[in-house]
Image (cartoon, rainbow, N blue to C red):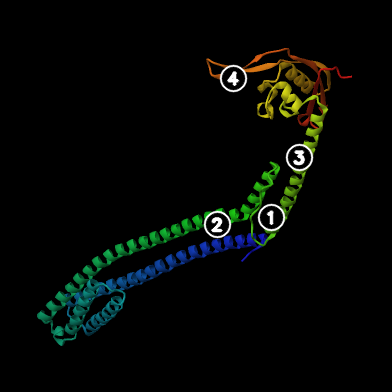
Amino acid sequence: MHLSLKRRIAASFIIANFVVLVMGFTVFFFLDSLNTKISSITTNSNKISLLTDEVRISAVSILKMQKKILTTPPSTEDLQRLETLCEGFQSQLQRLDTFYTEVEAKKIISKMQGYVDALKTIVGKTSLFYRDKAGLSTVNELTDKILEAFSEFQDIQYFQNEQRDKQVRSIIGETRRNMLITLIITFLGTILLSLIIPGKIAMPFKKINDAVRELQDCNFDVSIYYNQEDEIGELARELNKMITSMKKFEQLRQDRISVEHRKFDTLANMVRKNIIISNAKSEIIYMNNTMYSLLEMQSDDVMNKNVNETLIPDSIIDTFETAIKRRSKIENADIIVPRRKKILNPETNEYEFEESEEPFSGYANVIPIRAKESNLDYYMMIISKEVFV
């Protein structure tokens, strides 16, 4: 599937928005889950606290009524009141039992329910009206057991409150960790996308930029490889066509220069005068055969080298440097070219040159071939024994 550059950029924005939405909904999910769990724990805790307070009030009321019965002759209303308190206390214990799943808490609640049932049974006996000492003692004993069991239940409840606080802190910590992990993953994913997507978009432009730089260095053996059917692909194909055309043009230009060079070389050798050409950097770019014979050198000794780095006579070097410095024509400058003889030095076992015979003495004319910029000038020197007219 090939997307255009416009659609690719639009897709990157859609992905970025999607990541932001996912992160937002994930954070909302964790916060909502945290709120739900804490709300559930808090609601149950509040219900248990309210019910425990009711149980405490009922227990205190039973204790008061028990003291009244033991200190004064009980009336029918007192016994009915105590029985009603026991029934309400029993109902409260049954509701309280539904909020607990721990075996120990259920065991204590069941124990209190048993004591309350026994107390109701004792209260229902008519012997209490006659102050049966055994019945009164049983009421006192059962009331003490109810209070003792309630104290044990409060200890368990206190421990469970601590556990509840730890659970809330654990839930908050887990939610914080999950949110932190989500943020880290989102952050890393965003960085990864910010590295990949711009790279995918910018890579074709980098290829085009590299190809243009190669063209600036006159390297036409370059091509842009990009197979996407989009705006950049169309640009790459057009640039490849342009590079192919430029390469053909450069080849034709080189062929033309080669032909002209051969023509110039032929003409220069037909003149039978000594010709040498340098550029504005004093680098030798051409010498005809007559000049090679005069200087007794090979092309490797002088071509594309600065005149100061060769064994060309000083008179020729000075004349060239003067013409380049002045950027002007020089006429009939005196030139002396010493004759040299190549001999083998027996001590070093190397060939050396020494002057022999009479030197060549003549005159040189330097003709500047100017360009738009001075660093593109060429300077042609013609050397002859006769003075140029």
Q: Which residue is mark 3?
A: 258
Q: Which residue is mark 2?
A: 193
- Between disc 1 and disc 2, whose residue precedes? 2
Local SS, label 2? helix
Instruction: Name the quadrant of the C terminus.
Output: top right
Q: Quadrant of residue 371?
A: top right
Crowd rating for badge 2 (residues with CA inside 10 Å; few <14, some 14–19, many 20+): some
Q: Position of residue 158 (x, y in %)?
A: 27, 64
Q: As drawn, is 369 to the left or to the right of 105?
A: right
Report how far apart the C-alphas of labels 1 and 2 lie in the structure: 25 Å
- Between disc 4 and disc 2, whose residue precedes? 2
With respect to residue 325, does 53 lie above or below? below
Residue kind at label 1, given as amino acid type: Ala
Q: Which mark is residue 351?
A: 4
Q: Nearer the viewer, residue 165 or 259?
A: 259
Q: Which residue is mark 1?
A: 236
With respect to residue 27, does 297 lie above or below? above
Q: Give the foreground label among 3 and 2.
A: 3
Report how far apart the C-alphas of labels 4 and 2 lie in the structure: 70 Å
Q: As drawn, is 203 to the left or to the right of 332?
A: left
Q: Give the foreground label among 3 and 4.
A: 4
Crowd rating for badge 1 (residues with CA inside 10 Å; few <14, some 14–19, many 20+): many
CB contact under 8 Å: marks 1 and 3: no
Q: Nearer the viewer, residue 53 or 83?
A: 53
Residue at image coords 51%, 57% = 189
Report how far apart the C-alphas of labels 3 and 4 lie in the structure: 36 Å
Residue kind at label 3, given as amino acid type: Ser
